[in-house]
Image (cartoon, rainbow, N blue to C red):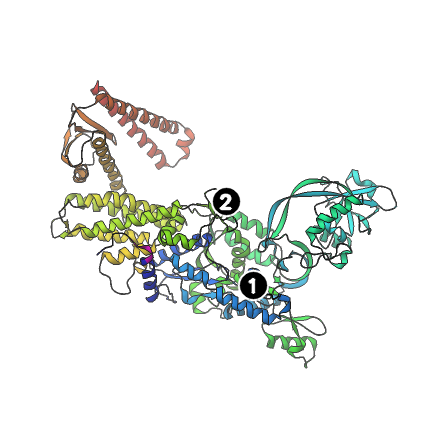
Amino acid sequence: MIATNYNPKESEEKWYKYWMDNNLFHSEVDNNREPYCIVIPPPNVTGVLHMGHMLNNTIQDALIRRARLQGKNACWVPGTDHASIATEAKVVAKLQNEGIQKTDLTREEFLKHAWAWTEKHGGIILKQLRSLGASCDWERTAFTMDDSRSESVLKVFVDLYNKGLIYRGVRMVNWDPAALTALSDEEVVYKEEHSKLYYLRYKIEGEDGYAIVATTRPETIMGDTAMCINPNDPKNQHLRGKKVIVPLVNRVIPVIEDEYVDIEFGTGCLKVTPAHDINDYMLGEKYNLPSIDIFNDNGTINEAAGLYVGMDRFKVRELIEKDLQNANLLEKTEAYTNNVGFSERTNVPIEPKLSMQWFLKMEHLAQIALPPVMNDDIRFFPSKFKNTYRHWMENIKDWCISRQLWWGHRIPAWYLPEGGYVVAINEEEAIKLARKKSGNNTLTIEDLHQDEDCLDTWFSSWLWPISLFDGINHPGNPEINYYYPTSALVTGPDIIFFWVARMIMAGYEYEGKMPFKNVYFTGIVRDKLGRKMSKSLGNSPDPLELIEKYGADGVRVGMLLCAPAGGDLLFDESLPEQGRNFTTKMWNAFKLVKSWEVANIEQPAHARLAIEWFSNLMGKTNETLNTLFEQYRISEALMTVYTTFRDEFSSWLLEMIKPAYGHPIDQKTYEQIIGIFEQLLQQLHPFMPFITEEIWQTLRKREEGESIMISLLPQTMAYDEKLLAHFEIVKNIIVSIRNIRKQNNVAFKDSLELKVKQNNRYPEIFASIISKMGNLSTIEIINEAPKGAWSFITDTVEYFIPATGQVNTEEIKVQLEEELNYTRGFLNSVMKKLSNEKFINGAPEQVVANERKKQADAEAKIAAIISQLAELK
């Protein structure tokens, strides 16, 4: 017995278990089949499923499932990222709740807590993805800090160091005072902030006057080592060669001159704090200025400042304003809006800080990774992101790859007792290199000290497409040769620099080729007010609750219906509701077909013609889907098959072939409709895996292990465009007959006569369908318009239905005049185009021909309407 209603929860549990039990997600090297591979953007190991994951993974699953249906060897590799800063912060917070400080623990003790946390939380998000229907090859699940990935990371570090691309040095870095680590430029998010501009008085040494400096950061004056003016600034010529005194600090500093200073900003005088501003640092290097670091790592003031020691930087800003005012050293303040850099992970303002760090030279890597994207060897969807990519590559800076953390890949560098260091893959290699470098063969590993820092998380994930197939540890192995380059990457444009660009760099550096052929950029999931969904705003639904309420297929359809590539998705709950309603539509169609009694009788003409039409339509739909998937227009692909099923299959085809009440359907039509239903389910399967499997398994008897997921979609299906065009006319005729019934209160059970005015455009071949769908007793070709009939015009052909009651000629005249006005307006718009020489000379020949056909059709229709109006007078 077929259930009255589709039960998503029951179906989802049943079929996911079936797929897993039959190992249908797993892929092995098979040189007889084309591989289709996607590697998952690894979510944070501590993460849980959010709406962005839902969108991203639904798209990936749709691509993978379609590849399987095309007979490709589809491999979707899942995994998680160790997420250094985020995970360490959560472990530190957990320990603090237990009364334990990170500083009270050794590195080894802390890492035990971190691994315990990871083992407890690490698999949550991957398990949640299963409820979405994600068909990942779970046997291949990887973690950026598992043994294979870790070995790959360390080997790459050593290799790049030996190539001279990794170096260690004191540089100005972005410092996160909350996470107590350096950040790369890409991990800094700039936000507009409403603050103040403080005008400070710097007394000119030996004079009564003051130089006025405008700054947004008065708390850094304790680190000032110079004042700078522009030599071309007429208003500050009196300061040339002078010295000034730092307010409150009373340190005498020189006035230097450099064209870097913006004459228009503030007073044209710039305070120079080399330890706490990247541009000041460059001035300090240029003019050999001393550098005074006044901040502790946590953003409090240190002893070197001499004032406000131990206080938080922002508390100092409040206090110093009052102290400057009391000392008569504050000229004024004014409201000011500026962009302030925040840590992407901890959301606290970063501090520019001089720090000893490890860096990777990027120039060579950028040079090898830019041309493939600009030449479309690697295709971006949408292509607008190529310009973003190019701009970053052409303005690239060296990558600060060290982080002052314990959770992550520890930098494989060991320091020697007498100074210097060696870089090695492990302790054994390190001691060999250390003995060779020092000439001291008695050195032991206890004499060396490994660098305390970890590598940036992205230094492991940039190897992801290679390391998942062990291409670093075992170059040229069968898996890397078969699955690499991968087919597609689905990700957000916000990590185009963090991840996409760097994977391309690593791909060309270590495999000599691209890591993926296509990159599909998803948009941001926003609420219906346009706000980005986030926990803090409380506007983000729980994805698992949505699945519980609407079913996984309903949610997938809801997400994809409004998800253009690179465009933001405006989400509200009407979308998954629409998806759920569509599953109901599919289930009802399935129940209808399975309710028919089948008999060994002759196939009627209307059924044969209906099947012929729909088979041609399926050919066109198949071609459209191939094109849309090739162009990564996933949302449009779903809409194409969605409307084909809802409008053409359910509303037209099933109605055309449906047997009369109490009568059976012929065997041939039934077999054909089952075949068509199967093809539609195949086309829908990438988007709606569960209900399509449920219906497919029940349409016919299946063997154990069979699945729609591995059934084969036809690659190409022939279709006749003319036949499809003719059938659209047939549908218009049927709709017009139905409208006449409705307008004149004629029940469908009452048959009507149809008279067609002689015209070679009438699609007579489909008369049996028109008769059935319109419940017509006869269709007759006539030469003259009959009196006392309802009428309509379709494709310039005039149709008449003898009235079963009184004909309201005035009402018919009003309708005809409305249609006449509309058609004349349409003809005018066509004629404007055809009278435009630019259009005639520049448009493709077929486009111009189409417009001329529109003109001829409109003119014929106008003539027919005028003729009908004349007969009504």
Q: Is residue 466 left or right of residue 169?
A: left
Which segment did they paint magenta?
3-9
Which image quadrant is residue 858 in?
Answer: top left
Residue 446 vs 751, above or below: the answer is below
The residue tagged 1 is: 94
> Measured from the top left, where is residue 280 in percent x and y?
72, 51
> Measured from the top left, where is residue 265 in percent x and y?
71, 41
Residue 95 vs 172, above or below: the answer is below
Who's the residue at 80% across and 45% down the image? 327
Task: Kindly report which numbered mark, 2 or 1, lies closer to the viewer in this rendering.
Answer: 1
The residue tagged 2 is: 531
* Dot 2 amino acid type: Arg
> Does the magenta run of residues contain 638?
no
Who's the residue at 49% across and 49% down the image? 538
* Dot 1 amino acid type: Lys
Residue 843 vs 430, above or below: the answer is above
User: Farthest residue in the right direction?
Assistant: 206
In this view, the residue in front, 188 or 33, is: 188
> Measured from the top left, where is residue 856 in percent x and y?
29, 29
> Measured from the top left, where is residue 711 in percent x and y?
29, 59
CA distance for labels 2 and 1: 31 Å
Q: Is residue 472 left or right of residue 63?
A: right
Name which of mark 2 and mark 1 comes first in the sequence.
Answer: 1
